[in-house]
Image (cartoon, helix red, strand yellow):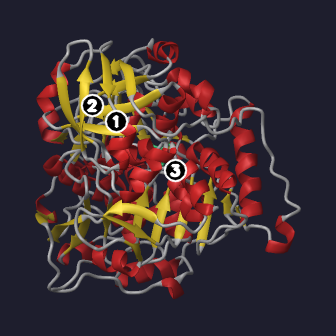
């Protein structure tokens, strides 16, 4: 029986467990990446593990999220990360060099390798045939120390592409179509593998748009084969020597199949406030818009910028619209300047932003009150743009650019013929903003630069004998990490200060939550399905840990967030009967008697006693050998320290 590409790469990296679907496996990690919003914590954790030098083939620290520097905090974090990188063998991509995923694809990614990153959009690397997975910072720290990374051996979904995209229909429309069909929960426990004749019609940047936004499916990752097109891309990046062919066996067996004829796709948009709330432009109708933002790790490649410039050439941005453009990397921005694209955009009235995440993470460019904003980004969760009433639509760069000119959500196909946009044979290569680490001999002399905003990891404690605690918060389905631990210009500078950032935990849902939880001392959160979808930010687990959360009881979890809870030593529980969700109210006191002994004995079904109503509720506590030991120890840091002894 033939293997999928996913299974081939996973098996080649297997260091623990059996390749059996649904079971936990440990894989060797070849490369890691961090960004600054999760990186400070990841490097504090790495330091706490006491490993002098990274044991990966390549680890890179990027600065791309917190670049507003509205106060000393961000700049201090940059200096801290830069100094840790230098000392411990990590390459450092300086602020201004671009968004981690875009730069990693251009300069470091290698087909057939494994990559984990402390950012949920790490699957961008799947665009060149890597198994690239988003993870919590602590998991990345462990991988940097040479430890395995643990995932559930996934099911593999075959997305069979045929045909060719029509002019002005875009890779973004492909992933929006997949999201429409599978939903934000559809990828949980699965890898999405793209195959078929249609693959050959897509360039690497287009493939990367698709794998990047596969994160919104909740998928473990997404992957394309590495073929001649990948080879050309890597050669154009001056890295042809790292290319290898990577593909599934012809008789590979998949768990599910989705067929997409690219030629039938039309321009789409994800409507507020979920990436799977997808409608065609025709269905949405004539929508007057206030803002357009082009960029983010999903759509900021040179190819995207070439299309946008072509559309804007000789035009003026509509008087009622603000257009912001953030190119994905210094390479892209540099080439835009050389090719004259930048001048076209400036002429049209675009507001050019630095190569960074920017508005995608609410770092500036929030829309006006109730404003309608078209963005080429990957997430439109409530409040993420920095305002509570912003109406964010996720669209392709083509659609965004045309609409910026017309002032309405417009169908890009109306502009007629499309020229053939060819990627250059050689990209402009200048890695002067990537600082190599110090040599092993010089590393001892490198001083770590710590600012006053950098506070240590919160206190942890081994799992208690019995948990008796009130419910401090009850929330609905599809709670995102942007609800749990919001980002934005005000809060992001606190990413290395858990006591301070905790004051913002869940405030999108309930402003009084942080104070209430802290006062209660210890408590439990109850939630619905797909709890914790979205970002990889471990702060969404560390802030609750700091606020005394002992367990989270929900209908179902998103993958990375569940792992982050376990890493933080917070017990993840799911209802056996989802209807029991209604049996618990905020304020009820819940008890898990003898929970430590039961978890230690490997019992997977536990009973929660609602002491307020007297009702007994069966819950699942699905911890395997390793995750069980992590929870008993009080989290992955304690577990790793114990195991490193
Ligand atoms: C995001 O897109 O939500 C982020 C900001 O890149 C996060 C990481 C973070 O919260 O720092 C992600 O996707 O993991
Ligand atoms: Fe940055 Fe946005 Fe990409 Fe997250 S999704 S890495 S915030 S550009």
The answer to whether mark 1 and mark 2 are in CB contact below 8 A is yes
Q: Pointers 3 and 2 in contact (CB under 8 A)?
A: no
- SS category of the residue bearing label 3: helix
Distance from the alpha carbon under mark 1 to that under mark 2:
6 Å
The residue carrying mark 1 is 380
Residue at the extreme right of the image, as rendered: 445
Residue drawn at 57 percent across, 27 percent down: 501
Question: Residue 625's x, y, as percent?
Answer: 37, 58
* C-beta proximity under 8 Å, tags 3 and 1: no
Return the mark for residue 636: 3
Q: Which residue is mark 2?
A: 272
Residue 109 on image: x %, y % = 50, 71
What kind of element bears circle 1?
Answer: loop
14 displayed left or right of 60: left
Residue density around tag 3, few if under 14, some if 14–19, many if 20 or more, within 10 Å: many
Choose the circle earlier in sequence order: 3 or 2.
2
Rendered position, 205 above or below 612 = below
Mark 3 or mark 1: name the one nearer the start of the chain: 1
Q: Nearer the viewer, residue 222 or 546?
A: 546
Which residue lies at the image location 65% right of the left edge and 51% below the top edge? 43
From the viewer's perspective, is 46 left or right of 112?
Answer: right
How far is mark 3 from mark 1, CA to CA? 31 Å
Q: Quadrant of residue 375?
A: top left
Residue 151 spot, x, y in % from top left: 36, 61
**In the image, is residue 393 above or below residue 440?**
above
Q: CA distance from mark 3 to mark 2?
A: 36 Å
Quick one: label 1 or label 2, which is nearer the N terminus?
A: 2
- Give 269 or 182, whichever is nearer the viewer: 182
* Residue 160 x/y as whole percent: 15, 70
């Amino acid at each position: 029986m033939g293997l999928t590409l996913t299974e081939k790469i996973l098996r080649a990296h297997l260091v623990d467990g059996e390749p059996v679907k649904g079971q936990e496996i440990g894989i060797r990690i070849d490369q890691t990446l961090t960004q600054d919003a999760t990186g400070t914590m990841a490097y504090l954790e790495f330091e706490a593990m006491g490993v002098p030098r990274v044991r990966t083939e390549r680890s890179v620290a990027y600065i791309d999220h917190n670049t507003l520097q509205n106060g000393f905090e961000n700049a201090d974090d940059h200096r801290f990360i830069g100094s840790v990188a230098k000392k411990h063998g990590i390459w450092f991509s300086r602020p201004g060099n671009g968004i981690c995923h875009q730069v990693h694809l251009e300069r470091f990614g290698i087909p057939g390798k494994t990559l984990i990153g402390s950012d949920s959009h790490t699957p961008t690397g799947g665009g060149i045939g890597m198994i690239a997975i988003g993870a919590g910072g602590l998991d990345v720290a462990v991988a940097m120390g040479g430890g395995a990374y643990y995932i559930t051996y996934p099911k593999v979904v075959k997305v069979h592409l045929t045909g060719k995209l029509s002019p002005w229909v875009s890779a973004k429309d492909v992933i929006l179509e997949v999201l429409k069909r599978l939903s934000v929960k559809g990828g949980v426990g699965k890898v999405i593998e793209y195959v078929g004749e249609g693959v050959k019609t897509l360039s690497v940047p287009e493939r990367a748009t698709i794998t990047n936004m596969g994160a919104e499916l909740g998928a473990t990752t997404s992957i394309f084969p590495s073929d001649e097109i990948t080879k050309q891309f890597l050669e154009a990046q001056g890295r042809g020597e790292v290319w290898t062919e990577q593909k599934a066996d012809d008789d590979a067996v998949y768990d599910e199949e989705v067929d997409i004829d690219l030629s039938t796709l039309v321009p789409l948009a994800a409507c507020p406030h979920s990436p799977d709330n997808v409608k065609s432009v025709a269905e949405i109708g004539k929508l007057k818009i206030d803002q357009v933002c082009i960029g983010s790790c999903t759509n900021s490649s040179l190819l995207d910028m070439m299309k946008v410039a072509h559309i804007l050439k000789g035009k003026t941005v509509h008087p009622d619209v603000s257009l912001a453009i953030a190119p994905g990397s210094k390479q892209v921005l540099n080439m835009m300047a050389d090719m004259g694209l930048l001048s076209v955009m400036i002429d049209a009235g675009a507001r050019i932003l630095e190569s960074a995440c920017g508005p995608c993470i609410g770092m500036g460019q929030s829309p006006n009150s109730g404003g309608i904003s078209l963005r080429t980004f990957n997430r439109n969760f409530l409040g993420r743009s920095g305002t509570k009433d912003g109406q964010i639509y996720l669209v392709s760069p083509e659609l965004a650019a045309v609409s910026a000119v017309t002032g309405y959500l417009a169908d890009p196909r109306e502009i007629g013929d499309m020229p053939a946009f060819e990627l250059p044979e050689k990209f402009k290569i200048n890695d002067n903003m990537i600082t190599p680490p110090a040599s092993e001999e010089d590393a001892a002399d490198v001083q770590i630069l710590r600012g006053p905003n950098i506070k240590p990891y919160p206190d942890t404690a081994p799992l208690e004998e019995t948990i008796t605690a009130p419910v401090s918060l009850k929330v609905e389905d599809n709670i995102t990490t942007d609800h749990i631990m919001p980002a934005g210009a005000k809060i992001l500078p606190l990413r290395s200060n858990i006591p301070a950032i905790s004051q913002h935990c869940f405030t999108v849902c309930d402003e009084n939550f942080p104070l209430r939880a802290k006062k209660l001392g210890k408590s439990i959160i109850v939630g619905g399905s797909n709890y914790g979808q979205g970002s990889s930010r471990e702060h969404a687990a560390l802030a609750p840990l700091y606020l005394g959360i002992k367990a989270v009881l929900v209908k179902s979890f998103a993958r990375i967030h569940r792992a982050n809870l376990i890493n933080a030593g917070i017990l993840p529980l799911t209802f056996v009967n989802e209807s029991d969700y209604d049996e618990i109210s905020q304020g009820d006191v819940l008890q898990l008697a003898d929970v430590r002994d039961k978890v230690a004995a490997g019992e997977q079904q536990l009973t929660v006693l609602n002491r307020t109503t007297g009702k007994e509720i069966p819950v699942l506590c699905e911890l395997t050998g390793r995750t069980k030991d992590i929870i008993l120890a009080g989290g992955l840091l304690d577990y790793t320290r114990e195991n490193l002894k």
